[in-house]
Amino acid sequence: METGNRLTRLLAIFTVLTFILSFSGMTLAVDDGARAYWKGRDGTNVVSFQYLYLDMQASGTQQFDPSMYIYPDSDTEANIFMASWARHITLFNRPSSFALNFTGGSVDVDVNTSLIPPEYLPPGATPGSTFSQSASGYADPTIQLDVNLFGTPPLKSNVDLFNYEPTWTFDAAAMLAVPVGQYDEDKLVNMGLNRWYGRLALPIKYHFGIFNPGQMSSFELTPSVWLFAENDEFLGQNLKNDPMWQIEAHLTNDFTPSFYGSLDLLYRSGFQSEINGVDVGDELDVGNLGFTLNYQTTGNLNIRTTFSSNVFGDSDLDNSILRLQFVYAWNTASENLKRLEKGH
Amino acid sequence: MDSSWKRLSIRPALETILALILSIGTIQAHAADPQQTGQKSKRPNILLIVADDLGYSDLGSYGGEITTPVLDQLAQQGTRYTNFYVSPTCSVTRSMLLSGTDNHVAGLGGMGELLAPNQMGKPGYEGVLNKRVASVAELLQDNGYHTYMAGKWHLGLEPDQIPHARGFERDFSTLVGGGSHFDDGWNVEWQIPKMPYTEDGHPVEKLPKDFYSTKTYTDKTIQFIEEGRQDGKPFFAYMAYTAPHGPLHLPDDWLRRYKNRYDEGWDGIREQRLARMRELGVVDKGVNAADRLYFLPRSTSLAPAARVMQGRKMELYAAMVEYMDDQIGRVFDYLKEIGEYDNTVVIFISDNGAEGNDLRGMVAGQVGTLGFLHAMNNFAENGHNALGRKGTYAEYGPAWAQVSSVPFRLYKGWVAEGGIRSPLIVSGPGVQGTGELNKKAVLHVMDIAPTILELAGIEHPSTYKGREIAPMQGKSWVGMLEGNTQSPRTSDDWLGWELFNNRAIRQGDWKISWLYEPFGTEDWQLFNLAEDPGEQYDLSEKFPEKKKALLALWDEYVKTNGVILGERSPFEKARKTLPDPVPGFDNYPPFRGLEALPYEKLIELMGGSTEEK
């Protein structure tokens, strides 16, 4: 009986655990972005710094639980910083890229406890007040490899770039997160997930513009699946999750040679949680729409901003994401060319 | 009931009227029927095809690597000629083509756009096909021919100067020299920002969305012939293609037809062409081509990416030539379908040498000018993958132009052989020598009008519509085409040229020319074209008497045609706009690496990728 009560409570508690998990691991909160799988010349390095602001409100039946109690109303804010380094390489004679991502920041959760039965309030929380929990530090770093399977020849030289006029391209990508990020097993909100996880993706692109700066357009679709190991230190429980299915899509278009925009879509489902062998909560069903604007300030530096908000899927989880990103890319050959042109 | 009655009663009357009209037409046609002059009973159709800025050696039948199966087949059916001359530029050639007389007589003593101040208003320098001549179309139209034109006119913009006013009963024409090949229709000249088009004498307000010059001109030619053929009259169709004149534009599915074909660079392609020309007999074995122009780099000294960039332009050019060939094939197929091909004399020429000048630069070279503004608004896109599409302006430049001109020197605008020697193919009824290569005949574009008139059994009149007209200076080829002679000219006959103050005289194998520096010395030079078609060796000092004799012919040419040398010339500053003729990219210092190592290995040793071609 006691066991039964415990399970019932857990079921209630973790109704929407899936969503908070989906951004507790901060890498999860970030989509790949528009033109993420466009190829550069072999040897090109790309360094990116980005700041994300996430805002989320859970309401109605879609509840947010930062602890072990039911919290139907909650507000969450996250400030995330991400540094990435990617390098375009040729692997198996295919254009590929290798990337490392390091994420950190903070998350703050505020929950209105007025609708919560007193017995479910966490220690120290007062009925009718606001309960808060925070986390800060590093999230789990990730490593990603992307290999083109079809549609892009090896881009080893400027000659190859000159001859490159893609239409359909198909890639395969694999990402692995290393569970070394901040984690406190007594808290629901953490920066890391305390378990291995990763993603398999099949990025697909169709270039329907002229592949020339100022005239390029693309439709990009990246179906992927996230896979999670178990976390046996989740509030003293064992947490398992089903795979999370994700579709990311972008419709990009050059406005000028140095300015492009994109309509963005991100949809996630699955991710059914299981605590101690029992399903809890609902599957994820969140769809965001947004846009990206990217301006190339110099030959090396791009400034990018994106905004997205959930507009379909479960309507009880309002979220919006604002991103500001600086992307700096260089290739030794190009830099040498610049040096020669400048006469030194 | 009432209408049926009318139809029944009117129909016999209409039939009678129609029969009368037809019989009158027949009488009119018979009035000029060659039967009366003892020639063939059925007058041939004439299909005159003019390419725009096509180089001498571009066609497969002349040694080019460009795929031109239709024109190659035409050459197999007819005869190719290796000594056919045109003017250095297009409108000038066209004035002689249609009038049969010298450009200084026909109104194009200079191009209308580039007349010198002292030439303006002078007879022969009207800048349009003047009324001192009757066009061959006018004479054919008056003598029972249907006369059609599609393509480039460039001989006048005013209502009394356009094709419809100069003898073409049907036309779809652009009146100016060059511009977009698509429906955006921008003109190269900023003074007339949009290319004016006429159809049957009326301005074309808006080009169809799917307009592409070469295809549309072909469509129109076929349409005109189809709509006019019921009365049985022969036709004269003038297909004045604007290909491959810059900007190099192509339909999307033709853009990459020659992808990477020219990455090896101009020197290799040029050598291969020359070898094929020797195999075909177009060039005599043992005769050298002109040297690579002194200011052009050896293509094997270029980095791989630079070669790809340069090669892309030649890819576009080649595809334009093949596309034109393909469209000419459509016309031939149509003529075969209606049973007229075997009664059609086809003449194919280019209007001048390949274009090696920087026309875009001439239009838009100066920031802050209207020309620059025009370019900025209409053809500013120059991205590598955008070239060839709407809104771009690609030209292939002097390096590739000298490939198109091989074995000759220079290109359009200049009276060196590369500017004035054109391919010529003639085929059709009465043309002897199937597949023959005629290297004896020295021919000129002025000859085409008298040839057409003789084929049609028409005498050139001394007056036309009440005004005296100049006699034709060209010589009919009919005797040659029928195999009676090898050339319409004797070794004493001579030809003369003058444009932009550059000038030349050819008599037999000898030629004198005066060219602006740096391509010339701004003095007369003497060449023997039989031994030196590339005009590399000035023989002035060795054969002073020959030079003197030719200079006398120049004086005669000036006097006969009313030549007025200009106070100004578009080439007067060529010396300043082109590098000095000193060794630089030339063969000094010796390029030893090339001989020692394969190109790929050389690149690799330099630290580049062997993947780079």
Image (tube, rainbow, N blue to C red):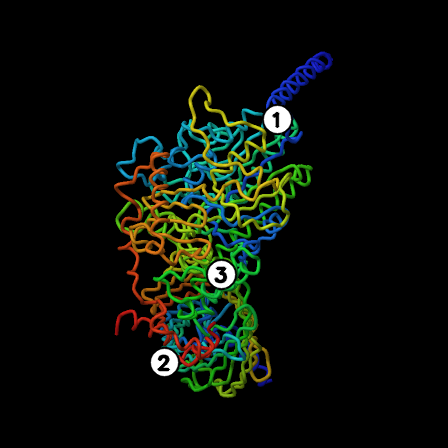
Q: Secondary structure at mark 1?
A: helix
Residue B446: give x, y in percent of width and height.
Answer: 47, 38
Front-lying residue, A230 or B268: B268
Front-lying residue, B186 or B557: B557
What is the chain letter for disc 3? Answer: A
Mark 3 touching mark 2, by CB under 8 A? no
Residue B23: give x, y in percent of width and height.
Answer: 66, 19
Residue B377, compared with residue B123, is above or below; it is: below
Q: Which mark sits nearer the N-terminus, 3 or 2?
A: 2
Mark in front: 2 vs 1: 1
Q: CA distance from mark 1 to mark 3?
A: 69 Å
Label disc, if present, on residue A136 of the rendered structure: 2
Label disc, if present, on residue A218 of the rendered structure: 3
Residue B580: give x, y in percent of width and height.
Answer: 28, 60
Amino acid under label 2? Ser
Quadrant in which the C terminus of chain A is drawn: bottom left
Q: Are marks 2 and 1 on the same chain?
A: no
Q: Which residue carries the number 1 mark?
A: B37
What is the chain letter for disc 2? Answer: A
Residue at left offset 60%, top offset 84%:
A1
